Image (tube, grey):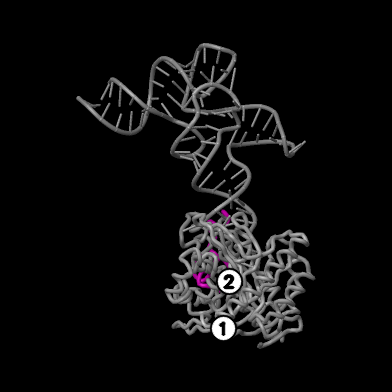
RNA sequence: GCACAGGUGGCCGAGCGGUUAAUGGCAGCAGACUGUAAAUCUGCCGCUCCUUGGAGCUACGGAGGUUCGAAUCCUCCCCUGUGCA
C-alpha cells in the first residue's frame, strides 16, 4: 500500500510473478491470446502492466495442453508482464443459449464447432494452471440481470461452492502451479468472485464467506450486465469495506471512462473491460471531449487529432479525417489505430488517478 | 450487318400481369457496444407535404400499344455484352 485517501481510494502496488503492478489499474482484455489489433510491444510501450486472457477461448483453441507444451501463455504469446485469466464463468453467462448448468459444472457447446464440453471448477483450474497466468480466477456463475431473489440465491450458492472447489483444487496442485519461464514467472494467485445479484445482503454474505476461504484477491462480478449504474455503484460500495485491505480488489467488466475513475477513487484496485477495444473496432473513440464516432461525416475533412489533449502515438501523428477514411474503407489499420488510442486513453485515466490519489493522501 | 443475351432506384442484382416505391447485397447516413460467439449489431435509405399514421408526386432504356390493371405482354427505336461475318 502506498497511499490511501479519506474517500477510500487506494494507491498501491502488487507484486505479481511477472510484474509489479501499479494500482489502481485498468487491464486490457486479450481474450484469445491477443488484445485485439494491438501487438504486444505496443501494449508495453503504452504502459500496460497486466492483460487478460480467457480460459474458455484458449481451452477451445488452440487448447490448454498445447499452450502448456509451448511453455505457458506468457511464452506462447510473448508477453513478459503480468496476466490474468478469466475462469470461463462469464461465458457460462454470455453463451447462455448453449449451456446447461448443474451443481457439478457446466455443459456447453463450443461456439466454434458446436462440440460438447463439460467445465467444472476443477477443470477450469486445470486449464488455468496450464495457461499459467499470474492470476487465475475462481470458476463462478455470473448472475444475469434481472434475477429475482430465489434465482440470485441459487446462483450464489453455486458460485460459493465452486469457489471452494476452485481453491481446494488449485491448492492441492501446488507443485504444478509454478511456471518458470524466461520472464521469471513463479506461483499463481487465485481470486474469488463475489456474486449475489443486486441484493446487498447476498453480496455481503458472499464476500464474507469468500474472505474466510482466504483467496489471494477478491473480485466483484455480475456487474455491468444491464443494471442501472446506481445499482452497480451500490453493490461495489457494499462489498468493498468487507474485503481485506492488503489484498487486491477487482471489479470485473467495467466500464466507461468516468466509471473506472469513479470506482478507482472508491478503492477498487483492478478493472477490465472490452469496451475500449471493441468500441475502437466499431469506430468509437473515447476522448477528453467525450465520445467520438469517427465514422461521422463531419470528420471527413477534420484535420485535428482524435483528441487534442491526448499525447498518444495516434493523436500525435494522425488526423480525424484519416481515421475516418480508414474506418470507412474497412482498412485493418483502422482497428489498430483506434484501439491504440482508446487503450492509451484508458491507461492515461488510471495514470492520472494514481497520481491524484497519491497527492490527496 | 446477322444471331443470341441483356438494359430495374448511387452501384450490383431479384422480380416477369395486380398483394411492387419495387426482395437481397454494396455504398451512404445515424445509433448502439461494459469479466469479447462482436473489424459486430440496429435503424434510415426515390421526392414533397402533414402529427403517429398517412397524403400526393415521380419511377423499372425511349416512344407507342394490348389490358379494368404493365417493370412484367406486343410493336418500333436507342444502347450494351458475346459470337459469327
Please, what secondary structure does the residue beneath circle 2 have?
helix
Q: Which residue is mark 2?
A: A122
Image quadrant containing the C terminus of chain A: bottom right
Q: Label 1 is found on which chain of the structure?
A: A
Mark 2 or 1: the one toward you: 2
Residue at x-position 66% and y-position 75%: A164
Q: Is residue A356 left or right of residue A80?
A: right
Query: Looking at the rendered structure, which numbered label has been put on residue A16?
Result: 1
Question: Based on the displayed image, in which of its 4 quarters is residue A117 positioned?
Answer: bottom right
Chief secondary structure of the magenta span?
loop
Question: Is A133 located above or below residue B16 in the figure?
Answer: below
x then y, percent, for residue A144: 69, 60
Instruction: Say few, some or many: other residues with alpha carbon within 10 Å of mark 2 (under 14 / 14 to 19 / 20 or more).
Output: many
Q: Nearer the viewer, residue A354 or B7?
A: A354
Residue range corresponding to the magenta coloring: A296-318
x then y, percent, for residue A268: 68, 77
Q: Label 2 is found on which chain of the structure?
A: A
Report, in whole angstroms, how far the alpha carbon at label 2 lies from the one at label 1. Answer: 23 Å
Looking at the image, which residue sits at the far bottom?
A2
Amino acid at each position: 500500500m502506498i497511499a490511501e485517501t479519506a474517500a477510500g481510494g487506494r494507491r498501491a502496488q502488487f507484486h505479481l510473478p511477472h510484474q509489479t503492478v501499479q494500482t489502481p489499474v485498468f487491464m486490457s482484455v486479450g481474450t484469445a491470446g491477443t488484445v485485439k489489433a494491438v501487438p504486444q510491444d505496443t501494449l508495453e510501450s503504452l504502459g500496460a502492466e497486466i492483460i487478460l486472457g480467457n480460459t474458455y477461448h484458449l481451452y477451445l483453441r488452440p487448447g490448454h495442453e498445447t499452450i502448456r507444451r509451448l511453455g505457458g501463455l506468457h511464452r506462447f504469446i510473448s508477453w513478459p508482464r503480468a496476466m490474468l485469466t478469466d475462469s470461463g464463468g462469464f461465458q457460462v453467462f454470455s453463451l447462455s443459449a448453449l449451456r446447461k448448468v448443474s451443481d457439478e459444472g457446466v455443459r456447453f457447446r463450443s461456439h466454434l464447432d458446436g462440440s460438447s464440453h463439460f467445465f467444472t471448477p476443477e477443470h477450469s483450474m486445470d486449464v488455468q494452471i496450464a495457461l499459467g497466468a499470474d492470476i487465475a480466477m475462481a470458476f463462478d456463475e455470473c448472475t444475469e440481470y434481472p434475477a429475482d431473489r430465489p434465482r440470485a440465491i441459487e446462483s450464489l450458492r453455486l458460485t460459493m461452492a465452486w469457489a471452494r472447489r476452485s481453491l481446494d483444487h488449485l491448492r492441492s496442485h501446488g507443485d504444478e502451479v509454478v511456471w518458470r519461464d524466461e520472464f521469471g514467472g513463479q506461483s499463481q494467485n487465485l481470486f474469488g468472485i463475489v456474486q449475489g445479484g443486486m441484493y446487498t445482503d447476498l453480496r455481503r454474505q458472499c464476500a464474507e464467506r469468500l474472505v474466510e476461504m482466504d483467496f489471494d484477491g477478491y473480485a466483484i462480478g455480475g456487474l455491468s450486465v444491464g443494471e442501472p449504474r446506481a445499482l452497480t455503484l451500490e453493490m461495489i460500495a457494499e462489498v468493498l469495506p468487507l474485503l481485506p485491505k492488503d489484498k487486491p480488489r477487482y471489479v470485473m467488466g467495467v466500464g466507461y471512462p468516468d466509471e473506472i475513475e469513479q470506482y478507482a477513487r472508491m478503492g477498487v484496485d483492478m478493472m477490465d473491460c472490452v469496451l475500449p477495444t471493441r468500441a475502437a473496432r466499431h469506430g468509437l473513440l473515447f476522448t477528453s471531449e467525450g465520445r467520438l464516432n469517427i465514422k461521422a461525416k463531419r470528420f471527413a475533412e477534420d484535420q485535428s487529432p482524435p483528441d487534442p489533449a491526448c499525447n498518444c502515438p495516434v493523436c500525435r501523428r494522425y488526423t480525424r479525417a484519416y481515421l475516418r477514411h480508414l474506418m470507412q474503407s474497412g482498412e485493418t489499420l483502422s482497428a489498430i489505430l483506434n484501439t491504440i488510442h482508446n487503450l492509451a486513453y484508458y491507461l492515461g485515466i488510471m495514470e492520472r488517478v494514481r497520481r491524484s490519489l497519491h497527492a490527496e493522501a
